[in-house]
Image (tube, rainbow, N blue to C red):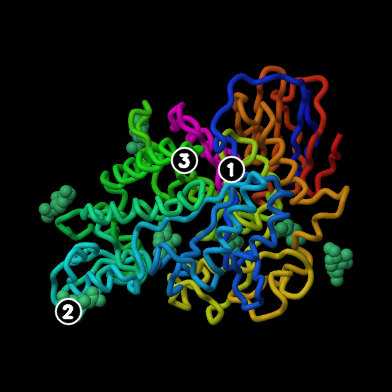
Amino acid sequence: MYLKAILSFTIFALHVSAKSVHKGDSDWWKHATFYQIYPRSFKDSNNDGTGDIPGIIDKMPHLIDAGINGIWLSPIYDSPQVDQGYDISNYYAIDPLFGTLDDLENLIKLAHDHGIRVIMDFVPNHTSDQHEWFKASENRTEGYEDYYLWADGTPEQPPSNWISCFGGSAWQWSEKRQQYYLHKFAVQQPDLNYRNPKVHDEMKKYLEYWMDLGVDGFRIDAVEHAYEVKNLTDEPRTYSPGVGPDDYNYLYHIYTDNLPETYQLVYEWRKFIDDYAERTGSDTKVIMTEVYADLNTTMLYYGSADGSVLGADFTFNFFFIQNINLNNSNANDLDAIVNNWLNALPEIYTSNWVLGNHDNRRYPTRFGPENKDGFNMVASLLPGVLVTYNGEEFGQEDGEVTYDQGQDPSARDPATFDQVSRDFERTPLQWDNTTNAGFNEGAKTWLPVSEKYHTLNLASQLVEGEVSHYHNYRALIRKRQENPAKFGSTTFKALSDDTLVLKRSYENDHIVVAFKLGWHNNSVEETIAVPEISCQNGIVALTSVGSKYTVG
Ligand SMILES: *[C@@H]1O[C@H](CO)[C@@H](O)[C@H](O)[C@H]1NC(C)=O
Ligand SMILES: *[C@@H]1O[C@H](CO)[C@@H](O)[C@H](O)[C@H]1NC(C)=O
Ligand SMILES: *[C@@H]1O[C@H](CO)[C@@H](O)[C@H](O)[C@H]1NC(C)=O
Ligand SMILES: *[C@@H]1O[C@H](CO)[C@@H](O)[C@H](O)[C@H]1NC(C)=O
Ligand SMILES: *[C@@H]1O[C@H](CO)[C@@H](O)[C@H](O)[C@H]1NC(C)=O
Ligand SMILES: *[C@@H]1O[C@H](CO)[C@@H](O)[C@H](O)[C@H]1NC(C)=O
Ligand SMILES: CC(=O)N[C@H]1CO[C@H](CO)[C@@H](O)[C@@H]1O
């Protein structure tokens, strides 16, 4: 069968149904959809300008309706909020900005009542400088001396040339201790010393505390930064054009990033968490790791290929984020990214697909708004786990933020604010077209609400019978639970520079996605053979917004 004249930006999924029973069931998380909530921006229940845990509780009906299986909460722990909660001053307390421990317990209970799991962010790479451990360590209080990475130097000459991810030297002089401490991020975020066994014990205590409270797993933040070489050797220069000596990319991070000890640490945590689950008879507690690295390095965080050593249940697949962009990519690039990943992943492990998060521009901005539905179809119907960043389900786009309104500590230079700032993808969720997009009751919001909310909001996409990004997302989440999506074989390939096909097959049951990309804003019609659609009785199950096809 030929698909004739697929109009530009037309995407549709074809589904042929034939009832069949699958054999054996897998772990709950292996086909799950995890939904990342950025709590500051999700829903502000007390009108103080910042989202909070009661706000998440208010929006539980939406999460249930969407059909997601788990929420992952970006950090809500006690924090001076220098880096929006990634600078933790107490791992055992909830920041009052977000609510109380009772609120969190209520959220966990409510979520569990609806079959939704709760994943907490685990931020092991550093603490806040306001943490008691740091105060004690700086003071050389007995037992705490080596909780952080301290090194000698003079106020003029730091121990090495290492650079912080936020720019400038990664070393900060402490008058009090008369030594330098390492900070891979902000000055207020001293790095913990993982060569100290006491730090390992502290982290296990922390994991256990939250598992006792009922959380279903952890997303481990920035784990690649946990270790650096003992001898503190200078890193070599990259000699990249236009990159200054304060810029993180001035150096190759061969001595501070993704050291072999880092995988060992993940393997150690995995064992600890698995042992806990076994001891308490609970379901698998899932571990997801955040690592920006090449494909081979990324795979090492899963564990060994034969499964004799296990690491994360999955480590985020950031290749859509790292390797695809609107201006320079085409269907062949997508084909390569997906197939390279699937080929590199040892068979025993579970794949995962990520389009965006709180650290990268929203995907409609990176891939073009015409491709919103197409990418959701591909990401949700490829095998394995789907991770959705809040707002992606209805196609929220980047907000508009000026330098003066910016909150991101990594974007301190007005000249590079637009390239560096992560504020654009963090503006409040656009729930409806009322005041402040329904995020709160009108108080000034921590980041401005995008002006796009008048037309781009969830409520406008709930109209029964209309094709919308949200209706498509919701349908896809359900389709993910059908046999071809769960257990089927996978074909994903470029048919031309602008067209792709994804086919999942399980016995006589097939799901086919035909995707015409809108990369180049090209509205030329293309006639193309799609041999993957060979069945006689296929029906159009979903169409993208703007498609000329109709369901049925
Ligand atoms: C600092 O060190 C002194 C002397 O060891 C000790 O008495 C004091 O309690 C310490 N302060 C903190 C904050 O640990
Ligand atoms: C420092 O340690 C690293 C890793 O062990 C090693 O590759 C490097 O050569 C050492 N540098 C010096 C100057 O000893
Ligand atoms: C990645 O691993 C594969 C298989 O072990 C190997 O063939 C390939 O050269 C590696 N790629 C890089 C960039 O190291
Ligand atoms: C893509 O190209 C346009 C036009 O040349 C340019 O304005 C825009 O900044 C580019 N976007 C990216 C992400 O490079
Ligand atoms: C606001 O949204 C509601 C429901 O989504 C819609 O009925 C109404 O027309 C919208 N108003 C404006 C001014 O867009
Ligand atoms: C696509 O190109 C047309 C004609 O050049 C232009 O009017 C339209 O705004 C463009 N659309 C996008 C999404 O860039
Ligand atoms: C990769 C990365 O930068 N991850 C996080 C590690 O911690 C910093 C500082 O708190 C966060 O900003 C990052 O998001």
Q: Disc 3 marks which residue?
A: 314
- C-alpha separation, residue under disc 1 versus residue under disc 2: 48 Å
Foreground pick, 300 / 33: 33
Labels 2 & 3 near each other (Cβ < 8 A): no
Q: Disc 2 marks which residue?
A: 155
Q: Disc 1 marks which residue?
A: 386
Labels 1 & 3 near each other (Cβ < 8 A): no
Dot 1: within a 10 Å radius of its alpha carbon, few (fewer than 14), some, or many (20 or more) residues? Answer: many
Magenta highlight on residue 351: yes
Q: Residue at x 62, y 77 (%)?
A: 49
**Is residue 513 toward the left or the right of residue 218 in the image?**
right
Question: What is the span of residues highlighted in magenta in the rendered image?
Answer: 329-354
Labels 1 & 2 near each other (Cβ < 8 A): no
What amino acid does circle 1 point to? Answer: Leu
Q: Secondary structure at mark 2?
A: loop
Q: Secondary structure at mark 1?
A: strand
Could you say where residue 192 lies in the image, as x and y percent from the top left? 28, 61
Could you say where residue 218 lies in the image, as x and y percent from the top left? 46, 49
